[in-house]
Image: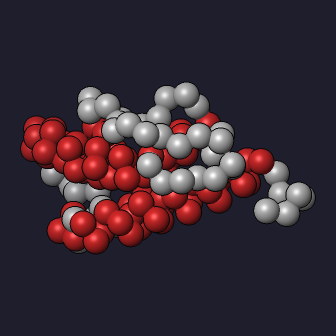
Amino acid sequence: MPAGISRPIRMRRALRRATATAHAKFELRYPQYAAALFDEHFLASRAADLLERYITSDDPPKSVELAAAWAEQIHMREGTKAALVSELAPVASKFLFMFETEPMGREWNGQMATEAPKLS
């Protein structure tokens, strides 16, 4: 990358690339979930702040947080939504694993995750 681009910009670009690549793999493997609003729009809007925690804090998102953001897109009663979040958390975990194992290059703290995210 050009030397004039700041580290935060490089990190955000790496984050967007990793998100797009992970989503493409996720969509191929789980098209039913991509069709159920776990799509590029969701990742760029409701999930964006969660995924940005990979570059802004030491507290990456948990699958239940991503599932809750996904469920927020669907307007329903709170009790029903809580059950849906429980159902969606394992799916969100699959995406986070794909995301975390994407090679980020040097922009991504020089590291690559090698283990599955913790389910919580």
Q: Is residue 39 left or right of residue 19?
A: left
Residue in the foreground of this view, choosing between 65 and 30: 30
The residue lying at 26 percent from left, 33 percent from top is 119
The residue lying at 85 percent from left, 63 percent from top is 2
Where is residue 59? Give x, y as percent: 49, 29
Q: Is residue 33 left or right of residue 113?
A: left
Query: Could you say which quadrant of the image residue 108 lies in?
Result: top right
In which quadrant is the C terminus drawn? top left
The residue lying at 51 percent from left, 58 percent from top is 18
Where is residue 60? Give x, y as percent: 47, 35
Query: Could you say which quadrant of the image residue 52 lies in?
Result: top right
Q: Is residue 34 above or below residue 83?
A: below
Where is residue 28? Give x, y as percent: 28, 71
In which quadrant is the N terminus drawn? bottom right
Where is residue 8? Give x, y as percent: 73, 47
Q: Is residue 108 left or right of residue 78?
A: right
